[in-house]
Image: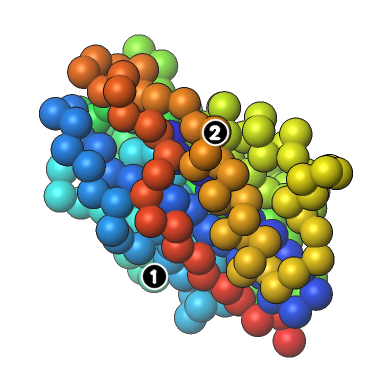
Amino acid sequence: MSIAIAIIGNKCGIVASDSREVDNGGNINDNFDKTFSLLDENVIAVQIGLLKNGLTKISDLIINWVTNAQPFRLLSDLVKFINDQLEAYLNIQTINAPDKNISILIVGRTNIATGAFKKWGIDVVETNGVFSASNHQIYESLGLAGDDSSVKSINSRRKQPYNLMKAAPLKTIAERIIDCGIDHSGNYTARPLQHIPTCGGIPMTQTIDLN
């Protein structure tokens, strides 16, 4: 699994990832948009892990589900809806991929169009063919998900002398963190992919204005 981050600054919120598509044969696609938006760009999100089911992008499914659902009053309601839809969908599919888990980071306002900005995470874990989804609000300054080695290195470098979160434009901070994740990532564990780093795709970001 690659690395994904979510940050809320003074002027904007940002999500970013270096997510990469790797199939069972070891073919890699790094050049694609890792982020997406919902509800007229009032909500931004980033996804890592299982990105496609066959030719169907998971993010496209989410966009379609949300677009065709009843209006959402609260960001927490939207998160729970995506959580439940993903779990139900994946448990009736046959998934053939080296990484079947999913992590999604979401940034939006409490009341979708108004209120304070919040960060949420959704995690989908596959165990013996059964998918379980859970969600949580993120209270830390940095929302972080993905490769264990990358996450550990990023967390250890958030203080001096590295200070990945030191003052800078938010996009610069996001790119700095993603680069650290790439530099310290582990490899896939599934055969024959053990030589392929889980991180290393082309980093991409999406921002939302806080004004």
Which residue appears at 61% of the width and 76% of the height? 208
Q: Quadrant of the N terminus?
A: top left
Res. 52 mark = none
What kind of residue is marked 1? Answer: Thr
Q: Is residue 11 above or below residue 183?
A: below
Q: Is residue 120 left or right of residue 59?
A: right
Q: Quadrant of the C terminus?
A: bottom right
Could you tell me if the residues under marks 1 and 2 are in contact, i.e. CB atoms within 8 Å? no
Q: Is residue 95 left or right of residue 4?
A: left
Of residues 195 and 4, the one nearer the viewer is 195
Q: Is label 1 or label 2 in front?
A: 2
Of residues 10 and 128, the one nearer the viewer is 10
Helix, strand or loop under label 1: helix
Q: How many residues crowd around disc 2 within 10 Å: few (fewer than 14), some, or many (20 or more)?
A: some
Of residues 13 and 29, the one nearer the viewer is 29
Q: Which residue is mark 2?
A: 184
Q: Position of residue 43 (x, y in %)?
A: 56, 69
Q: Residue 49, located in which quarter of the rendered image?
A: top left
Which of disc 2 and disc 1 is earlier in sequence?
A: 1
Q: Which residue is mark 1?
A: 67
Q: Position of residue 65 (x, y in %)?
A: 37, 60
Q: Is residue 134 above or below residue 186?
A: below
Q: Is residue 60 left or right of residue 186?
A: left
Q: How many residues crowd around disc 1 within 10 Å: few (fewer than 14), some, or many (20 or more)?
A: few
Helix, strand or loop under label 2: loop
Q: Position of residue 84 (x, y in %)?
A: 47, 43
Q: Position of residue 146 (x, y in %)?
A: 53, 37
Q: How many marks do you count on the picture?
A: 2
Question: Can residue 13 be seen by looking at this rendering?
Answer: yes
